[in-house]
């Protein structure tokens, strides 16, 4: 399927700030980003199946992406009082991931099987990840990991995709990446 048909179908999705298509060979990974996860600033390290160490090593995550030829990059933008306000940015991230699932569904309707990276850890189990209570993931077909868990360099991604990466103190930007066209 060509890019224009995909964009035409996705034009109905509200809340999207930008889309771009990138070849997986143009993505830059930095295993050093895994340190961000290990510092556990989001509180999900070792307690969420979509997060390290359960999601895989940086090398395994990159290999997962490299199985595909193309990625669709989707971006949302949210006005906030301050990008440092965690409650505001968390709510924006929640909305972003809702839009991300809508995009994933639209891709499925087009017959495109895609794997996704989204913003933050998987939140499909509303209260707590089943990992925390020692049960298997009931939704492993929908589990997604964040761009940090993949060690994807988002600054370089935005540059390659021709999208903004930073929008100032009062606007937060989030990205989702959809990998498709298996090699």
Image: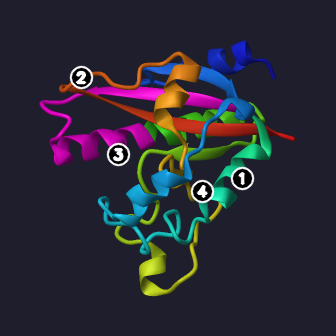
Q: Residue at label 3?
A: 94
Disc 3 and disc 2 in contact, CB within 8 angstroms: no
Per the model, the C-alpha gap separating discs 3 and 1 is 25 Å
- Between discs 4 and 3, the one toward the N terminus: 3
Q: Left of 160 or right of it: where is 133?
A: left
**Whole-percent x and y of residue 63?**
73, 53
Which image quarter: residue 133? bottom left
Question: Is residue 155 at all visible to an observer of this figure?
Answer: yes
Task: Identify the element where label 3 is drawn.
Answer: helix
In the rendered structure, the answer to whether residue 37 lies left or right of residue 137 reads left
* Residue nearest the viewer, comparing 45 with 1: 45
First in sequence: mark 4 vs mark 2: 4
Query: N-terminal of the two: label 2 or label 1?
Result: 1
Q: Check whether the beta carbons of the residues at disc 4 and disc 2 lie within 8 A of each other.
A: no
Which residue does the image show at 47% across and 60% down from the upper left? 124
Q: Position of residue 88 (x, y in %)?
A: 19, 41
Q: Which residue is mark 4?
A: 142
> Does the magenta segment cover residue 91?
yes
Q: Residue tagged by mark 2?
A: 168
Which region is colored magenta?
A: 70-97
């Amino acid at each position: 399927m060509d890019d224009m048909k995909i964009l035409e179908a996705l034009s109905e999705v509200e809340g999207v700030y930008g889309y771009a298509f990138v070849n997986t060979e143009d993505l830059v990974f930095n295993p050093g980003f895994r340190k961000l996860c290990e510092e556990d600033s989001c509180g999900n390290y070792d307690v969420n199946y979509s997060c390290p160490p359960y999601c895989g090593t940086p090398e395994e995550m990159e290999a997962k992406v490299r199985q595909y030829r193309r990625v669709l990059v989707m971006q949302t933008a949210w006005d906030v009082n301050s990008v440092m306000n965690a409650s505001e940015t968390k709510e924006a991230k929640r909305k972003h991931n809702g839009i991300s699932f809508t995009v994933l569904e639209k891709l499925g309707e087009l017959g495109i099987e895609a794997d996704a990276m989204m913003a933050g850890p998987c939140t499909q189990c509303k209260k707590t990840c089943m990992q925390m209570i020692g049960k298997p993931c009931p939704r492993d077909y929908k589990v997604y990991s964040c761009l940090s868990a993949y060690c994807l360099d988002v600054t370089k991604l935005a540059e390659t995709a021709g999208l903004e990466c930073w929008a100032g103190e009062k606007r937060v930007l989030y990205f989702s990446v959809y990998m498709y066209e298996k090699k």
